[in-house]
Amino acid sequence: MPESKPIAAAGWWRTLVFTAALAALSYAAARLMFSAFMFYDDEGYVLVSLRNFAEYGGLYRDVYSQYGPFPFVVYYVLHGLGLPFTHIAGRLVTLASWIGTALACAAVARQATRSLPAALAVLAGTFAYLWIMVSEPSHPGSLIAVTVAVAGALGYRWLTEGRVDRWALLTGAAAAALALTKVNVGGFVILAGSAFILLHHRDDRLRRIAPWLLAVGALLVPLALMRPMLSLGWVQTFAGVFAVSALAALAAAGPNRQAVAGWPTLGRCILGGLGVVAFVCAVVLLRGSGPADILEGVLLGPLRMPAAFNLSYTWPAATPAFAAAAVLACAWAVWRRRRGDARADVVVAWLRLAAAGGAVYAVLQFPDSSPDRVIFGFGAPCLWLFLWPLGGTAGPERTATNWLGLLWLGQSLHAFPVAGSQIAWGTFFALPLAAAGAADAIRWLAARRNSPPDTAGDRVRRYLPAAAAAALALLVGSRFHDAARRYDDGSDLGLPGAEFLRLPSEASALFRVLVYNAAAHADVVFSEPGMFSLNFWSGRPTPTLANVTHWFSLLNRERQEAIVRALEAKPDACIVVQREHIEYLTKRSFAPAGVLHDYIDRNFAIAFKLDNFEFRVRRGRTIDPLLLGEMLVYGEAAGKENTALKLRLALPPGRTVARIEITDPRQPGAKGLAFHPGNARVEVTPTDLRGVPSGAAKTAAWPFPSPGPATVIVHFDRFAQPRPTAGALITLRDAAGNEVALARLKE
């Protein structure tokens, strides 16, 4: 990218452009954040754990979590400042982390390239790269991403300014915070920081042998980390790709590294880490946990995780050959460098531009496919290209780039053993690294040309990269905004603490059916797998404080038996079973089993089913479901009232129904049913929430009100209407056509 003046000197308009782009992308990110809800509901599990810690304490002793205490302390402090434990609040915190991560990446690109278009391209690309944030609201992954981003961006800035002591304190604090979130992620930062200190140590002898020491570590670390699952093919590929990529990166860093660190630097890292550890542990201990509980939550529990649940990554078929070719290219370049052949730098510069182009290609696949999965598959073998000092340069910028590269390499291991959202959280720094490396290569190649200044060709070469970066920023930003338009479709969920969450209408209706019936018919709600958002929305408690999505594999027998005892004490307990999720786990050899699973199967029967969700009540008990319509046929003659829609409602106060529509979103072209004063008669019976009549049935005039719970029967001629489909969406509208309520037809 071309050199340009800093923002302050170049004009206020640069700041205005960047701010406007940030605002536009943040607005689109917010719309995306509030337009999805994942059926596996890690969001509900994390929220209920955070709330229980804030209210009861006893983290790990009573409140189960597979994550470390740092997120609990962060949310505990935020709650003390007034943040409620709701889906809206959790998504706003996640959104802030998403924005902060994108800002940090853009800051690195701006400093490294001195180009506003490059910073804008990285900003837009990072927003798109981390779109997975919308699937993991409140998850510690967003805190992990922003912590890594801040450690990388501020570390890059301070290292270029020679402020190594600040870098050390920040790195130690970030490593501790991450280790107290997920011990492996913090460990990767510790390894990256330690490698950086060794490579840039003031002791000449130690600095010379550091690459050899670290090469041994590069071979041992993946083997030690992945030992429990090394029999699996994808894990073997992961270990091999990491090892050869790390070896190439260490070889590329070169012999002319700056000597900026020493043992006092390590001491400051430790000091920064101890400060965070002391604060977090003090809060958790004061909230009722013991040292043994913290040891279990931070270290022992996570060590058992690979056996409890893992998710594989399908490596591109070309990755092993690509990694082998990359390490051979690195070996050739090192050999030519040692022989004083400047052509090695030329080859590396062009290969670096090609790799940066590959990153651009991956980002341009959004939203059709996830950029992170492509970059994860091919990024690590390319890392050495971006750590190679073109022309043998060893200035502060090269030192700072080494830090970013080591940090990225370590965080790429985050994808083990669960290669899901962790891929994006661990590899997003590929984008600023690509921008910085490309800018460096362009500048270096341009300097070699020695072409006369101010010629037409020189001006084209000077401004073409900036124009390309600006075009990339506009294109990716436009696609990001297009993806956010899904918020315009569907219906607001309208449930407590999630009022602004907008889903497809049939999904909003589904969750309203489950939640309204939980509130009406249950004194305690449990789910398999754990979907604790239902507890938030219905206001019904969980049996105990030990709550986790995959409780059948993560909770020991003692905790499961405690839940059984709590359910046994509640005669109106209800269970929600997500059959599709169970089938997904069963196919991957994680089928639910155990004492609690068996208890639920023996003692709870299905009251109704909807979209692979089973609403279960204790055997022998029956309920009259809310918001679940039923078609009743009582005559055969056409032109008369021969059919009825029976529907139990609990309408918002002051609302009336002027029209009822029944449609099937699965058949968008099919004609739906419509009931209105011209073709249907309405009969309303007031009831309590459980369906027990509290008054006589009366024919109501359209538009009809429903003051409190009621059973509504709509009489009509079925021969004059299309045939409804099981599970169809029922929309109740007022005279202005506004949605009053959503319901579903029984399956």
Image (cartoon, rainbow, N blue to C red):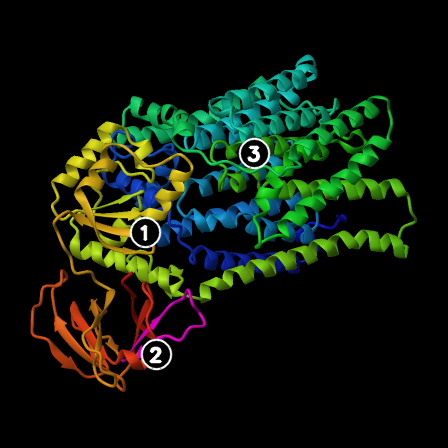
Classify mark 1: residues with Cα within 10 Å, few (<14), some (14-19) or many (20+).
many
Q: Nearer the viewer, mark 1 or mark 2?
A: 2
Q: Earlier in the sequence, mark 3 or mark 2?
A: 3
Q: Amino acid at mark 1?
A: Thr
Q: Amino acid at mark 3?
A: Ser
The span picked out in magenta is: 658-674
Q: Is 714 in front, or is 220?
A: 714
Residue 317 sits in which quadrant?
Answer: top right
Q: Earlier in the sequence, mark 1 or mark 2?
A: 1
Q: Is 498 in front, or is 401?
A: 498
Q: In the drawing, what numbered circle is on residue 86?
A: 1
Give the percent coordinates (x, y) of residue 427. Answer: 57, 39
Q: Is residue 607 above or below residue 415?
A: below
Q: CA distance from mark 3 to mark 2?
A: 51 Å
Q: Is 87 in front, or is 662?
A: 662
Classify mark 3: residues with Cα within 10 Å, few (<14), some (14-19) or many (20+).
many
Q: CA distance from mark 1 to mark 3?
A: 31 Å
At x 7% / y 74%, what residue is drawn?
Answer: 696
Residue 203 seen? no
Q: CA distance from mark 1 to mark 2?
A: 30 Å
Q: Which residue is mark 2?
A: 737
Q: Which residue is mark 3?
A: 412
Q: Is residue 607 above or below residue 247?
A: below
Mark 3 element type:
helix
Q: In the drawing, what numbered circle is on residue 306?
A: none
Give the percent coordinates (x, y) of residue 684. Answer: 15, 75
Q: Is residue 662 magenta?
A: yes
Mark 2 element type:
loop
Residue 245 sits in which quadrant?
Answer: top right
Q: Nearer the viewer, mark 1 or mark 3?
A: 3
At x 60% / y 50%, what residue is drawn?
Answer: 125
